[in-house]
Image: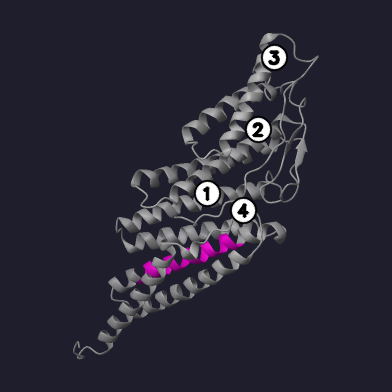
Amino acid sequence: MTHWFHRNPLKATAPVSFNYYGVVTGPSASKICNDLRSSRARLLELFTDLSCNPEMMKNAADSYFSLLQGFINSLDESTQESKLRYIQNFKWTDTLQGQVPSAQQDAVFELISMGFNVALWYTKYASRLAGKENITEDEAKEVHRSLKIAAGIFKHLKESHTPKLITPAEKGRDLESRLIEAYVIQCQAEAQEVTIARAIELKHAPGLIAALAYETANFYQKADHTLSSLEPAYSAKWRKYLHLKMCFYTAYAYCYHGETLLASDKCGEAIRSLQEAEKLYAKAEALCKEYGETKGPGPTVKPSGHLFFRKLGNLVKNTLEKCQRENGFILNPNQKKK
């Protein structure tokens, strides 16, 4: 699936020294601060390291977050927060709003922002893996697993941590609940794309593929709707991608539904279903062009040039022609084959 998944850029952050002269005393406390600084730097390095794999990412994230918990939760495991929670100022940019950073003197803000980047890394890893030629079954499973992990992280941040922020996220910022929800839904949709590709490869029943495609299209529509109230200046490109994927998978649903109808000798209904698929595929092609011309965050992918995209166009055309031939035979039962 080279050039298939749209990806917004990673969040950038300012360095943090974790030096607290006069506050931190003793070798043990100093070691914790040094470990925090080095584990944070290591995690940030891995985000852009193409040799990084999920195991490396998990170990690095666990190392940093386990230390950061000391700045969030009290050591006696009571319900009270740590006295160190507001000692450090953290700065992070947003995936959509360019290099304009947000800053909060709150360790929870750091936890959510870094966790957000970890989730983004899993989506980018899945995209790179899916872009390989002749992807194996195990690699397809890894893509699916990575997207599910990313969705789980985004969901956990939204439900368990963003409500604890003292300063709520501004509209259009990454930590706003609508934006996180859009990322969750996109991950779910893309994970299901892997399931659809596998179902087609294994030649599962057309009715099952149509149902999966329709559900995937609904995921993309829901994600697009979630972003509808954001400023077009930074959301238009992402929304074009979501819209074209919605049209593409709706076309898939109509195409395979048409095959199901044809198998039941409902040629007239099958033709109407395939004609609808033809219209939606043409719309998806047009949206691919519009997406490529729309300015916004993230590199521009080229879904229309991908084999998976082009295959659908041929499948719709061939299946529609088959339906029309079958319908002709039904209408003219005495006609001899030439």
SS of the residue at dot 1?
Answer: helix
Is residue 50 within the magenta segment? no
Q: x%, y% of residue 251? A: 45, 68
- The residue tagged 2 is 111
SS of the residue at dot 4?
Answer: loop
- The residue tagged 4 is 298
In this rendering, position of residue 333 left or right of residue 229: left
Q: Amino acid at mark 4?
A: Gly
- Mark positioned earlier in the residue sequence (3 or 2): 3
Labelled disc at residue 30: 3
Magenta segment boundaries in residue numbering: 240-258
Q: Toward which corner of the image does residue 309 lie, by quadrant?
A: bottom left
SS of the residue at dot 2?
Answer: helix
10 Å neighbourhood of mark 2: few (<14), some, or many (≥20)? some
Q: Amino acid at mark 1?
A: Cys
Disc 2/disc 1 C-alpha distance (Å): 21 Å
- Mark positioned earlier in the residue sequence (2 or 4): 2
Disc 1/disc 3 C-alpha distance (Å): 40 Å
In the rendered image of this protein, does residue 105 appear above or below residue 335? Answer: above
